[in-house]
Image (cartoon, rainbow, N blue to C red):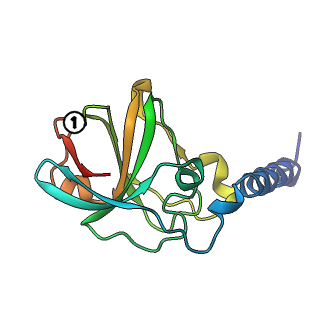
Amino acid sequence: MATRAQVLIPIAIAAIIIGIVGVITIPKESKLDEVNFPRGTIKIDDKALDVQIAETDAQKIRGLMFQNELPDDQGMIFVFSQEQIVPIWMLNMQFPLDIIWFDANGNVIHIEKNVPACKSALETASCTVQNADGKKAKYVLEVTSGFTDKFHVTENSKMQIISV
């Protein structure tokens, strides 16, 4: 029978390798200390939000990495060229998020609340959040945890793009 060390050491080595590979494969432009995202405005029901816009692959990979906070009136919107299944990668997040997936018409198709931060490369394997039931999204909005409850965002809510 294998000892505890014989089981845990290979698992720890695998986790480190996965973490290193994850960090190495981040595009160079995503690793910059400060990324300036274009900004826009959206509304969810009656709540206006100032959003950072992630449209390029590098912007989508970088997302909210390394940012320390996100006020209630701000978010980050990921814009895709067509509706698709969109997983969200939480690597190097510093705070938990609510994540909302929208179809091309601005209808909410899925909400994940209080998604925990994934601060280290060792957590890479568990840092991805999938939208439920494989529903296809055109937009994904990340907001600070508690936003959806505070502003009563539900599957019946609607997003309106003011300027993106």
Name the residue at 45% across, 35% down: 81
Q: Quadrant of residue 76?
A: bottom left
Which one is in front, 144 or 11? 144
Q: Nearer the viewer, residue 160 or 64?
A: 160
As drawn, which residue projects farthest toward the left?
46
**At 46% from the left edge and 74% from the top edge, which residue is drawn?**
68
Q: Quadrant of the N terminus?
A: top right
Residue 82 sits in quarter: top left
Q: Amino acid at mark 1?
A: Glu
- As rendered, which of 129 and 13 lies closer to the eye? 129
Q: Please tell me whether residue 103 is drawn above or below residue 100 in the rendered image.
A: above
Left or right: residue 27 versus residue 92 is right
Q: Could you tell me residue 37's position as x and y percent?
A: 46, 63
Q: Number of labelled discs?
A: 1
Nearer to us in this view, 68 or 44? 44
Q: Which residue is mark 1?
A: 155
Residue at x-position 65% and y-position 46%: 125
Q: Position of residue 144 (x, y in %)?
A: 34, 62
Whole-percent x, y for residue 9 in the image:
85, 54
> Does 22 sit above or below residue 104?
below
The image quadrant of residue 145 is bottom left
As displayed, is residue 100 above or below residue 70? above
**Which percent across, then down, holds residue 74?**
30, 64
Within 10 Å of the Cα at label 1, are there few (<14), some (14-19), or many (20+) other Cα atoms? Answer: some
> Label 1's element?
loop
Q: Residue at x 58, y 65 (%)?
A: 119
